[in-house]
Image: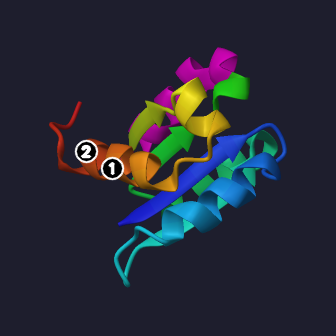
Amino acid sequence: MKVVLYCECGVTTSLLVSRMKLYSAPDDIVESYGMDDAAETIGKFDVVLVGPQIRHKFDEISRLAHSVGARCGLIDMRTYGTMDGEAVMRQARGLMDGPRG
């Protein structure tokens, strides 16, 4: 599974990515980028997660994700704030395993 997290600049999600990797499978890829890189990078991923600080851009990112066949979700503010990598990996897996559409 290939997962990407987007935030304003890609910096604040880097700690969360490192914590998510503790709960990822060996073949999982987890990366983070800033919103400005979304159009160029989103097509490389199966699951797109949006940081709560840019939730106002969720619809835009979700449309872009769906246009390339990726699943998209918004990271819960509390989960993000506590940097709960396990919970965010569960969210990514749930999106991957859930119905398409």
Image quarter of the N terminus: bottom left
Q: Amino acid at mark 1?
A: Arg
What's the mark number on residue 90?
A: 1
Residue sitting at x 60%, y 49%: 5
Which SS class for mark 1?
A: helix
> Where is residue 16, by image quadrant?
bottom right
What's the mark number on residue 35?
A: none
- Residue density around tag 2, few if under 14, some if 14–19, many if 20 or more, within 10 Å: some
Residue 27 in picture, x, y percent from top left: 37, 82
Q: Amino acid at mark 2?
A: Gly
Left or right: residue 92 versus residue 3 is left
Magenta span contains residue 40: no
Task: Relative to 7, say whether 27 is above or below.
Answer: below
Q: Main secondary structure of the magenta part?
A: helix
Residue sitting at x 80%, y 43%: 36
Magenta span contains residue 58: yes
Whether tag 1 and tag 2 are in contact, CB under 8 A, the answer is: yes
Q: Nearer the viewer, residue 22 or 99?
A: 22
Which SS class for mark 2?
A: helix
Q: Which residues are magenta?
A: 55-70
Q: How many marks?
A: 2
- Residue lying at the far front in this picture: please name it: 82
Left or right: residue 60 versus residue 70 is right
Image quarter of the C terminus: top left
What's the mark number on residue 94?
A: 2
What is the spatial separation of the Cα atoms under label 1 and label 2, in whole angstroms?
6 Å
Residue sitting at x 73%, y 26%: 53
Residue 91 in picture, x, y percent from top left: 36, 43
Residue sitting at x 61%, y 47%: 83
Task: Relative to 56, say whether 76 is above or below.
Answer: below
Q: Nearer the viewer, residue 71 or 28?
A: 28
